[in-house]
Amino acid sequence: MPTYIAIAIGGTLGCWARYALTGFIQSIAGRSFPAATLCINVIGCLLMGYLATVTLERVVISPALRTGILTGGLGGFTTFSTFGMETLVLLQQGAPGKAVLYVAASVGLGITAAFIGFYLARLT
């Protein structure tokens, strides 16, 4: 039961963070390109790479807390289902170039960010 509670708390906090950051990024970048979702997914990948490594190799925390942070918090924060829907909308709007750019940037930057997070965790 503690794991489920940790996931619920982490998920709530992750969703709140995503909502706040989405509004902030959209106020700067606008809404013509899904920059908020892209940024959130890249940041989430960076944090996942870093925190998964640190909590496995250096910081001793309970499995429930680790799951709450990684599955709940980052699962609530990142937005893959939104990514899929926004890609579909770009295609439906007749913007296949933007859709391809968005998919390539999301995947490429996401994997790069996860690697950087892993690397940073090993440096500290």
Image: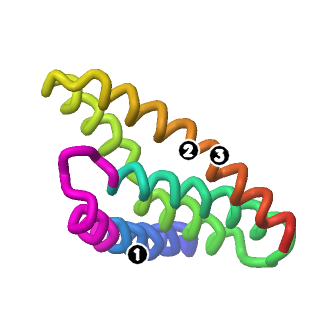
Q: Is residue 70 left or right of residue 54?
A: left
Question: Measuring 75% from the left and 69% from the top, which residue is drawn there?
Answer: 55
Question: What label sits on residue 112 in the rendered view?
Answer: 3
In the image, 109 versus 7, the foreground residue is: 109
Position of the C terminus by quadrant: bottom right
Which quadrant of the structure image shows residue 15?
Answer: bottom left
Q: Residue at x 40, y 49 (%)?
A: 38
Q: CA distance from mark 3 to mark 2?
A: 5 Å
Does the residue at mark 3 contact the one at mark 2 (Cβ under 8 Å)? yes
Marks 1, 3: nearer the viewer: 3
Q: Residues within 10 Å of mark 3 (few under 14, many from 20)?
A: some
Amino acid tagged 1: Leu
The residue beneath circle 1 is 13
Q: Is residue 72 above or below residue 17?
A: above
Q: Is residue 33 magenta?
A: yes
Q: Residues within 10 Å of mark 2 (few under 14, many from 20)?
A: some
> In the rendered image, which residue does mark 2 sit on?
109
State the SS at label 3: helix
